[in-house]
Image (cartoon, rainbow, N blue to C red):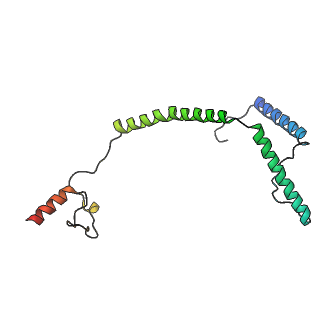
Amino acid sequence: WCGQPLLTTTNNSIMFAARAATRSIARQGATTVQRRSNQTVPRLGTQAEMEAEAIAQLRARVRRQKEIMDATEHSTEEEVQEMWKWVKISAVVATPVCVLSVLKDIFLVDHVHRPHGPLPDYMNIQVKEFPWECETCALFDLDCWKKCRAEQGN
């Protein structure tokens, strides 16, 4: 059932009537327009018959695509207007979302930073020395660098 409401009998009758109307229109148009099929290779026959059928299928596909393109053709101006409409809608939706998410991060989220002081032993494992003058100090551990330089100066 997937959580969707069951169709009532009136909805069913409307749906079946729409299907019947669509089928009758399709039957009337079938005489002039070749119906699509899932067959992509020509039926077995002689070489010439197979080539002719493949060419006919390709021509029918191209013809159908041209019909679709002619039925849904829009001018360039209409396309540009539609593009700008969606750019504006996207900006109107995205700007408040971005502002609200930044405000949420600033005011409501607790930013956890590294604790001050020495690290526990399990977080301070060092397999080999660093390749600089204070071999035990991490690159941006300024307190360690001060201690190391003070020890080297003495």
Residue drawn 44% across and 37% down? Answer: 98
- Answer with the quarter of the image where residue 139 lies: bottom left
Q: Give the image location of residue 78, x and y in percent.
A: 66, 33
Q: Nearer the viewer, residue 132 or 97?
A: 132
Q: Give the image location of residue 118, x and y in percent.
A: 21, 57
What residue occupies the far bottom of the structure in this picture? 128
Q: Can residue 47 be seen? A: yes
For the C terminus, give its image quadrant.
bottom left
- Answer with the quarter of the image where residue 130 lies: bottom left
In the rendered structure, the answer to whether residue 54 lies left or right of residue 2 reads right
Q: Can residue 43 be seen? A: no
Vertical position of residue 6 compared to residue 148: above or below: above
Vertical position of residue 127 compared to residue 26: above or below: below
Q: Give the image location of residue 56, x and y in percent.
A: 87, 54
Q: Give the image location of residue 141, x and y in percent.
A: 23, 57
What residue occupies the far top of the structure in this picture? 10
For the N terminus, give its image quadrant.
top right
Q: Nearer the viewer, residue 138 or 33?
A: 33
The number of callouts visible is 0
Residue drawn 60% across and 36% down? Answer: 83
- Answer with the quarter of the image where residue 55 lies: bottom right
Residue drawn 89% across and 59% down? Answer: 52
Q: Nearer the viewer, residue 110 or 152?
A: 152
What residue occupies the far front of the structure in this picture? 76
Residue drawn 73% across and 34% down? Answer: 7
